[in-house]
Amino acid sequence: MEKEEKLDYWRQNVRLIRWLLVVWFAVSLGAGILFVKPLNNFSIGNLPFGFWMAQQGSIFVFVVMIYVYAKMMDKIDRDHHADK
Amino acid sequence: MSVETWTYTFVTITFMIYLYIGWRARVKESSGFYVAGQGVPAIANGAATAADWMSAASFISMAGLISFMGYDGSIYLMGWTGGYVLLALLLAPYLRKFGQYTVPDFVGTRYYSNTARIIAVICAIFVSITYVAGQMRGVGIVFSRFLEVDIAQGVIIGMVIVGFFAVLGGMKGITWTQVAQYFVLIVAFLIPSVALSLKLTGNPIPQIGLVTSDIMPKLNQIQVDLGFAEYTQPFRDKSMLDILFITIALMVGTAGLPHVIVRFYTVRNVRAARYSAFWALLFIAILYTTAPALATFARYNLVESLHGKTMDEIHAMDWTVKWEETKLLQFDDKNGNGVLELTPDAETSEIIIDRDIIVLSTPEVAQLSPWVIALVAAGGLAAALSTAAGLLLVISSSIAHDIYFRLINPHADEKHRVMVGRIMVIVAVVVAGYFGVNPPGFVAQVVAFAFGLAAASFFPVILLGIFDKKANREGAIAGMIVGLSFTLFYIAGTKAHLIFGAEEAWFGNWCFGISAEGIGTVGMLLNFVVALVVSRLTPPPPQEVMDILDELRMPDHVGPAVILDESTE
């Protein structure tokens, strides 16, 4: 891998991480804590939505996020022929 | 068969399985002993990480804690799972690529400094010892509650079991027993939860029953009627800022705990490290999303079955008598009106409920057969033993690998290094056992702060070590010292009455009203700022370190692996 390509690989990795961290922040610290009160005006089934995000929803999103990260990194690895 | 016979049977069978696995996984080489030969499949490492992570506290106490805290209990749920996102995205893949044996190894090499290595070793040992003492205590408590064995004897039995497979198999033995322990603990947690969910909501899946049934609206109404705040009401006892900072401290602390990080050194390659983090959190999430549902159901059920009843009605239920004997449940008709009432004020409340009872009594409350109760005992032991084993290995490797091999005798041969590792496991087991039998007052207090300390010390230097090329030795050392000492000082000061037995705390929560549990977040921020600034005022890292860093950022098969010295390969 050439120097330029290595740099490109790292940049794509960092960009992916940055987006996922935004989601991470939004679903937990955002929806579960900072905006829990306004979100509690909505409901999911019989539960206030903000409360549900704090105790259930954020955890489901975390699991999916880590899976998405692993899959997307597989693709970035493939694009840079680093999967051999 | 009686509950006790079932419990003896289950505990004996599971212990035999752990011993058998430990014997099969015995190792001779140092790479097997410290990082399981780096050959653990991603899914198995995920299960081992989950068992390593979920302690006696997660298994026995967490649902109960949430049950009493309502919304505010979310700090544990988000905090102890959100950390895995940070671990998966920011640390695990790179530390696996680095490919050494311990966290201090990374800190010492990346910051080309034995001072940084030693600070990291001290943090690792301090965090792990406080944590492991709590686990040993947990083993003793499970034994004493379910089998009426003396706590000290229970701790000794636990020490022998953990010691056996950790000494023989090191990390490899620990990994495979943890995989077995995960299955024991998750089955033991799910069976009673599913049964209770089915009984109360008609839906066997607690996560769905929680949303679709009317339990929560009813519970909120009952809470209000009894004078409590609504169960779902946010910021009942803690401010929003405090909740935010505690959650961040738990998240970052989780990502910085050495016994969790080191699990990612044991998989085959970087790709396996990424998937293994996914499996780990999936396995953890199964328990962590069930626990809040169980907390809600159990609270509703307890209040419904106990409040406003006469003493005779309460004693007509078998399980109340049994738990009353253990003092986890207490009834006292203080105003003498013949009816027992639950109130928010501990002084006047006629029903006192210990939080541990939520998980422990669920099988009986849900009227399940005695063998389920026995299974819960085996599950609690699995949770405590698996976490203890992982911590003991960190303590052992910190001394045997980071201090003995790296600093004292770098020419030690394989045989010698494994032997020192085994001896250190024995020493660590004995120390942990001692604290388990004679818990010093402060240990219980300090365990809760282990996360804050890990957040304020390890996380920033590892993160900057990977993502900031300018981060250097001076910055890392200054950052760790400032972050750690500020956090220690604040915890010691606000908890002086609990830790040192002072008459009162030296000072209140002067830092924006943030409590000792959340101060690790401020310590972490200080660590970041100091490390960033100092790194830019002092000479940059040498070229070799820059080269290592370039390699660290590349995927598996590009360029040579990062090999620092021949003897570790």
Image (cartoon, rainbow, N blue to C red):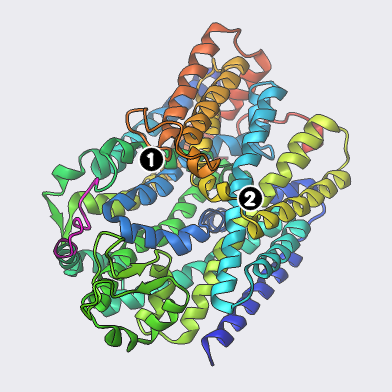
In the image, residue B568 lies at what x, y percent?
Answer: 77, 37
Range of the magenta residues? Answer: B223-235
Q: Disc 1 vs disc 2: which is toward the camera?
A: 1
Residue lying at 70% horizontally and 67% vertically, measured from the top left? B21
In the image, residue B239 lies at what x, y percent?
Answer: 27, 39
Rendered-image quadrant of the C terminus of chain B: top right
Rendered-image quadrant of the N terminus of chain B: bottom right
Q: What's the magenta bit mostly, secondary-structure-wise?
A: loop
Check the residue under mark 2 and report the chain it is in: B
Residue placed under numbered mark 1 in the picture? B246
Q: Residues within 10 Å of mark 2 (few under 14, many from 20)?
A: many
Front-most of B403 and B448?
A: B448
In the image, residue B556 lies at what x, y percent?
Answer: 59, 37
Residue lying at 24% horizontally and 54% vertically, measured from the top left? A52
Residue placed under numbered mark 2 in the picture? B391
Q: Is residue B307 above or below residue B369?
A: above
